[in-house]
Image (spheres, rainbow, N blue to C red):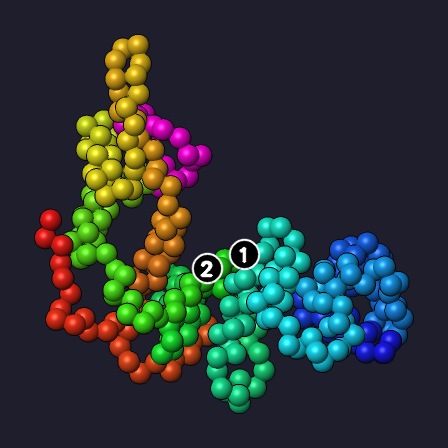
Amino acid sequence: MANVLSERIAELRKERGLTQEQLGQRVGVSAQAVSKWEKGGAPDVELLPALADRLGVSIDTLFGRERDAAEDILHLACRYITSQPEGKRLDTICRMLFQATQTMMPPGILSEPIQFPIRCTLPDEAGEPFLLMRNGAKLEEGLLFGTVSEEFSFMTITPEPEAGWAAYFAQNSDYRKLFTVLARPNCLELLELLYSEKEHYIVAEAAAARLDLPTEEVTALFEEMCGIHLLKKLEMELASGMIDTYIINENFAFIPFMLMGRCLIEKDMAFYIQWITRKSPLLRRPQGGRKEDTK
């Protein structure tokens, strides 16, 4: 049993990408103690719960007990994620999705696991500009898509609903309003300014001064952005009278939207991992055509 425990500690540590010193720091022992465990020694009994938690497994798993295989995989995944240091948990999830893309491939396709990339970009044939390297799986059940690397990662998972994705799209007329406003000169620059600062109310005159633009132009843009819910407006009373102030309609979608937009418009598709088994089109043909909102 001691040999099994030693082998499992070494195996799990290496799977987590930890050095003996790093694991020792998490458990509160020296690197020499971890080395001793992996060479046939055994941790003190009181250290086993902390050791299992830091490795993201159960104590049964440390001892190679078969019954642990029946444990809820979602529970195990959550325990593993929470075992990671703060600031690294989202990165851990992206790494798990990177590995998941490989597991979707049939046995025999890969002779060995594909290594986690260091860079997220790849130069095109001319050397520039740099293209985002994508990782993706296009399956009948849905899509997995994004960029994963030591440098930068983002991943999206989109299982296909029974009604198809298009059933949950906004009306095309609403998309046209959005893209029309985004295409206005200086609109994206204003959004980048607002999202790059701590959320606060701002008047058009102040934003105009920051970007060296006419106040009338910024006011018009702010009003259009309010019309499609990119901003919210609040009237504020000053000694000199009422003024309009604006604030970002806090929406996490802006960052993924800009990243996915880049992937959509890049002329080449640079894939680090790609697996496609889907034969049906991505969008189902709507019954009787898609209805438009005419308002």
In the image as oriented, which residue stretches furthest toward the bottom?
Answer: 108
Dot 2: within a 10 Å radius of its alpha carbon, few (fewer than 14), some, or many (20 or more) residues?
some
Q: Which residue is mark 2?
A: 154
Q: Is residue 270 visible?
A: no
Q: Which residues are magenta?
A: 192-212
Q: Which residue is mark 1?
A: 90
* Picture quarter with the N terminus: bottom right
Quarter of the view holding residue 95: bottom right
Could you tell me which residue is drawn at 32 percent across and 57 percent down?
261
| Amino acid type assigned to the residue bearing label 2 in the image | Phe
| Amino acid type assigned to the residue bearing label 1 in the image | Leu
Q: Is residue 292 visible?
A: yes
* Whole-number angstrom distance, CA of label 2 to CA of label 1: 9 Å
Where residue 239 sits: x, y (%)? Answer: 30, 10
Where residue 294 sits: x, y (%)? Answer: 10, 53
Secondary structure type for disc 2: strand
Could you tell me which residue is drawn at 73 percent across and 73 percent down?
61
